[in-house]
Image (cartoon, rainbow, N blue to C red):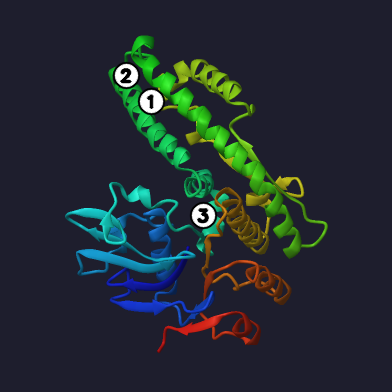
Amino acid sequence: MRIRELILRPFRNIAAIRLSFAADYALVFGPNGRGKSNILEAISYLSIGKSVRGAKDPQAVPHGEEFFDIQAICTDERHDHQLRIFYDKKEGKKAFVDANPLPRVSDLLGVFRTVHFSPEDVSLVLRFPAQRRRLLDILISQSSASYLRDLQRYNRVLTQRNHLLRAAKKSNRGPVERQVMEPWDVQLVELGAEIRKHRLEALEKINGPFTRYYDRFSPADEEVVITYQGAKESGLEALRTELKEALERRRDQEAQMGHTLSGPHRDDLKFTLNGESAEIYASEGQLKTVLISWKLAEARYMEEQTGRQPVLLLDDVFSELDPGRIGELLDIINEFEQVIATTPQDPDARQESTFEAIDLQK
């Protein structure tokens, strides 16, 4: 599904705006502070139902306002569809498809798929485990409704299990009685194993395109490898056994700490560059290239899983890239059906030949 029109009134620093994306490749440009990044964030809101930046909904409400409203006209091969997210500080958040309210905002996932790149993600994603897990969770949830359900159920079970552990720690009772903890352990093991299985399968499929894209941007002597840390097994039954044994092994330690120490909520993605940790040894340029390659590979994964390409949202993606990498990226962009990018500079000749320019100063 492609986006053809976006209407914001209001959202973050944008009081009201209506943008048309007549061409498949659009480059939104203008000075910093005009809302370029916020436009891409708003589009991604319609895709995942929340801020791709990880911000809370009230943070997207402009100062002095009580709500934000994001609407878009999107089209598939046959029909136009209206997508909308409306958030009110008092009434909360609601999502609509063709004016019909959805039971849950999360039901938007899979309706309109996007892949979002932002320069601020480079340090955030590549330096913090929680953000790396979030990379996988958003990616797989847009392609698999069952993964999203398992993840939501897992988080509810984890919350309840942690509540029991905190209560026991506060009362100095020692480990929670087994008969009390067992129902939550059983659910945590079952759901945790399913989540790990999905993540491992997704990573196996994304590794190939990720490596190919990174090789197109970088010297031949650079090798980047992604590994999943937290699960040594791969089969579902083996994953169940592994997690069950980990919970048993750390039962006393969990009682001391007051929270769950094993499970997919503690796992990580490890990026290594020529055998060394990328988050420690890679330059900023190398880290940005890693993340751009990952995002492009995300798009290929979604296409493989769903049969449809997502919309690429590339925020200030050309900054700090040398001319060779910019040229390679523009060649890659032409392989996708719709790309919306931003830049603070006026488009150069090569960009103008690829994109329809949208000037926010007008």
Q: Relative to 64, does residue 152 appear above or below in the rendering?
A: above
Mark 3 residue crowding within 10 angstroms, few (<14) / some (14–19) / many (20+): some
- The total of numbered circles placed on residues is 3
277 and 228: which is toward the camera: 228
Report the quarter where the C terminus lies: bottom left
Residue at 70% across, 75% down: 327
Name the spot of residue 293 as percent of width and height, x first: 65, 58
* Mark 3 and mark 1: Cα distance apart in space: 27 Å
Where residue 205 sits, quadrant-wise, is top right
| Image vertical order of residue 184 relative to residue 329, above or below | above
**In the image, what residue type sits under mark 1?**
Gly
Q: Secondary structure at mark 2?
A: helix
Mark 1 neighbour class, 10 Å CA radius: few under 14, some 14 to 19, many 20 or more: many
- 333 and 325: which one is in front? 333
Give me the residue at 29% from left, 51% from top: 102
285 or 202, nearer to the observer: 202
Mark 1 residue element: loop
Q: Of the residues shown, which amino acid type is indicated by label 3?
A: Leu
Dot 2 or dot 3: first in sequence order is 3
Q: Answer yes or no: do the residues labelled 1 and 2 have beta carbons within 8 Å?
A: yes
Q: Which residue is mark 1?
A: 258
Where residue 62 sits in the image (x, y, percent)? 27, 68
> Residue extending furthest left?
90
- Relative image position of residue 95 (x, y in whole percent): 30, 56
Identify the mark nearer the N-term, 3 or 1.
3
Q: Provide the residue designation for mark 2.
A: 168
Where does label 3 land, which residue?
Answer: 124
